[in-house]
Amino acid sequence: MDFSWLDRSYLIDWILVVVWYSLSNIFIYVPVFERDIPPQDAAIGHTHRPNQVNGAMLHLLSDGIPIAVVLIMALTRRSLIELHHGLLAFFSSTSLQRLVVGFLKNRVGRLRPDFLDRCQWNGRYCTGDTSLIRDGRRSFPSGHSSAAFAGMAFLFFYFADKTDCFRKRPQFAPRSWRSSVLLRVSITISPLFLSTWIAVTRLEDYRHHKEDVIVGSLIGTLSSWLMYRVYFQDPFSTSREPAGEPRAVYTSAWSQHGQDEFMELNQLEEQVRLQDSTADTRV
């Protein structure tokens, strides 16, 4: 196996992922901002009901599927960098979204649509279960939606990169079944249907307002995009970047391809500087 890409800086990356994830768990124990309770507000007067997608099922879908896909792809390609970068990009994106969502939930303190049913308002204060009431104050943004889109948007970018479906120069041979653009697009967008379904269940279960779901979905998608682009090529790029290949991020880990491009860029910049200096001399 090729270890030329390996750099000790990746250890710092993994440590930061663990730190982000650990900090996100701390918010569970931090006091939540307590908004005033409007007992006559119909927006928070819905019935409290079981989740269609509980926590275990959410982790199985939003975490298990992307991890399995990365493992299968790495084994198929026999690539250690594929495995490392895929897992690092995924775990960093999901840890980042958990950190952002946990912070916002506690600071905003928005009441869930089923808050009054949790609260059991007696005219002066809540008499319901304390843990249910506390969770009822953490509606914005939707953690389920954010986690679902962090996982499924990661797969969307991953599949887009591997299938090369959004580039103008497909890498597959013509007349091959893999050259079908519509097939590649269908594979690429399929994870988004799952994340959208999970987000919609949060509205159906009266666990979130529509704004909670929209913002949570955007946080998950943006976190996934930011972290994916750190470790992989742009799946929408029209440049000469090789499609579907992990990036050797750190200087000591540059591939020969990266070194050649860097040298070409330096040569071009030097030529421009020489032309500018020549023009200044003539003036």
Image (cartoon, rainbow, N blue to C red):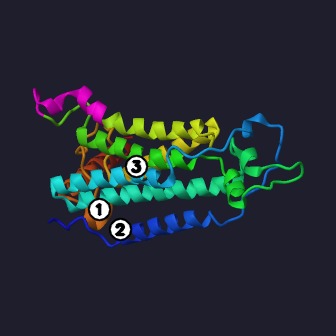
Which circle's residue, 1 or 2, is located before the other in the chain? 2
Residue at position x 34%, y 51% in the image: 66
Q: Which residue is mark 2?
A: 10
Q: Which residue is mark 3?
A: 61
Tell which of 115 and 229 is nearer to you: 115
Q: Are marks 1 and 2 in contact (CB under 8 Å)?
A: yes
Which circle's residue, 3 or 1, is located before the other in the chain? 3
Q: Determine the secondary structure under disc 1.
A: helix
Q: Residue 59: percent from the left, percent from the top?
A: 44, 54
- Quadrant in which the C terminus appears: top left
Crowdedness near tag 3: few (<14), some (14–19) or many (≥20) residues, C-alpha within 10 Å: some
Q: Is residue 266 visible?
A: no
Residue at position x 50%, y 54% in the image: 55
State left or right for residue 118 relative to residue 175: right
Crowdedness near tag 1: few (<14), some (14–19) or many (≥20) residues, C-alpha within 10 Å: some
Whole-angstrom CA distance, mark 1 to mark 2, is 10 Å
Instruction: Determine whether 174 is above or below 69 in the image.
Output: above
Tell which of 210 and 49 is nearer to you: 49
Instruction: Give, as a single range, the part of the protein colored magenta.
Output: 173-187
Crowdedness near tag 2: few (<14), some (14–19) or many (≥20) residues, C-alpha within 10 Å: some
- Quadrant in which the N terminus appears: bottom left
Whole-angstrom CA distance, mark 3 to mark 1, is 21 Å
Q: Which residue is mark 1?
A: 84
Q: Determine the secondary structure under disc 3.
A: helix
Q: Is residue 52 visible?
A: yes
Instruction: Determine whether 267 is above or below 41 in the image.
Output: below
Q: Disc 1 marks which amino acid?
A: His
Q: From the viewer's perspective, is the residue at label 1 or at label 2 nearer? A: 1
